[in-house]
Image: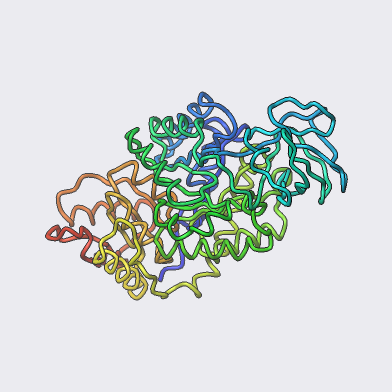
Amino acid sequence: MPTERVGRFQTKARTKIVATVGPACEGPERLAELVLAGVDVFRLNTAHGDVGEHTSRVAAIREVSQRLNRPIGILVDLGGPKIRLGDLPDDLLDCPLGAEFRFVRGETRRAANDLTTTYAPLVDELQPGNRVMLADGTVVMQVVARQADAAVCTVVQPGIVRSRQGVNLPGVKLSTPALTNIDRSYAAWAADVGADFLGLSFVRDANDVYELKNLLKAADGNCQVIAKIEKPEALEQLTAIVQAADGLMIARGDLGVEIDVARVPVVQKQIIALANAYQKPVITATQMLDSMHHSPRPTRAEASDVANAIFDGTDACMLSGETAIGDYPRQAVEMMNRIALVTEEASVHVEQGIARPTMHAAGLHQISAAVVSGASVMSQQLGARLIVAVSQTGATALALSKQRNFVPTIGVSMEDATLRRMCLYWGVNPIPGEQVKSRSELIAQIVLWGKAEGLLASKDRIVLVTGTHTSVTGHNQVLVHEIP
């Protein structure tokens, strides 16, 4: 197989990078910097900002995409039923070991040790013995008694909490639905502005995913639903959730609070393996390069974390505060891309030539799945410079992605939405196609593009996944073309 790539294909990792947009990287100029540094998909976090701000960000991203002539995906991340503390005196509160606090109804504190939250039924749903995790699990309280209008807790892990910080209740069965009214409003907005992916927070079972999909269908939305795995209930229903969703996100922040943090690395591997078995893109998220909020370099542990997620088989790695509010957004993207490139180079000898199952591929006929598998093997055996799939929906390009083929993979489509979806598929470079009347015209178009990019020359071989147009399967043929 060819080991060299030219131009941006030489410096762009196959692992996709999702970057969160925020004050540190707003505006077309700074967003363009991040795309050139390696970003494939931008995330809009609806837990922060308002519709007006996010609408401006969508317009800026689309402007950058047009200016750079590159598809760029947009992931709208719904906030979900995130429970947060109410306002505190002086914005912070010391919680010493053994101290007693009361979670009370409503929004008004009546005593110095009273705490309020954004979740109205909290007092009714807490029971003695339940744990209450605050500030990403750095402060832990345990419920010791119930009163008519309060749940009494003692601090078992001391620390300082601040106003509006998150509250996690591991093991507590909450009555709140996965989709809040605010989420429903943002989902309709996302469908209206043409977002590509919609992240569903705090998924507990497949019905949560289907509820959002039905909402999108009613709104004529074309978003793909990314189920965020961050609740223990989701792990119990993982296979059904994977089957229902269009993709997964391992949201390790809340997941690492809701379950024993020691389990997170193992659970990460299990989620990625299942997503790959069912041919669904999977994003690994939260604190991947967290120290780069304020440092131009990550810690060695963070670099290893990104690399291990790639070794696990993740399709994408996500940056959150690093790009949204950090001091070094561009450097964070460049660093993630560098780590991915080095890791992928080390992966070639392990991954290359391994046959990958494709029978679970959603939306892909069994014959097409087998053709994809054969094309992947042929491209390696023939030392092809490119493997190309022309795809209307993106299903064939996704199946090729899951083969983990280190021959550069090109996804060609005339559908802009399909090209943007490919931005989340590992190793797939989405390229706009032109209307062609024959296979020879298609090959000529690819060769012309490949030569312009410096990827192709005489005697190079291209493997195309295509169809005879005599079968309903669509892709039922592998074609090998050698450039004269």
247 sits to left or right of 400: right
Quadrant in which the N terminus is drawn: bottom left
Residue lying at the far left of the rendered structure: 470
- Report if residue 12 is visible in the image: no
- Report if residue 216 is visible in the image: yes
Can you give x and y, in whole percent of width and height, for residue 271 in the image?
52, 61
Can you give x and y, in whole percent of width and height, for residue 274 in the image?
46, 64
What's the colour scheme? rainbow
54 sits to left or right of 214: right
Please, is residue 155 above or below residue 482 in the view?
Answer: above
Please, is residue 151 above or below residue 232 in the view?
Answer: above
Give the mark count. Answer: 0
Please, is residue 201 above or below residue 265 in the view?
Answer: above
Residue 401's image quarter?
bottom left
Query: Residue drawn at (41%, 51%), measured in percent from left and top?
Result: 245
Can you give x and y, in whole percent of width and height, for residue 82 in the image?
60, 39
9 sits to left or right of 311: left
Can you give x and y, in whole percent of width and height, for residue 323 in the image?
61, 41
Please, is residue 88 above or below residue 269 in the view?
Answer: above
Q: 434 and 294: which one is in front?
A: 294
Q: 18 and 334: which one is in front?
A: 18
Query: Residue drawn at (38%, 42%), measured in percent from left and top?
Result: 213
Query: Residue drawn at (67%, 42%), measured in percent from left and top?
Result: 328
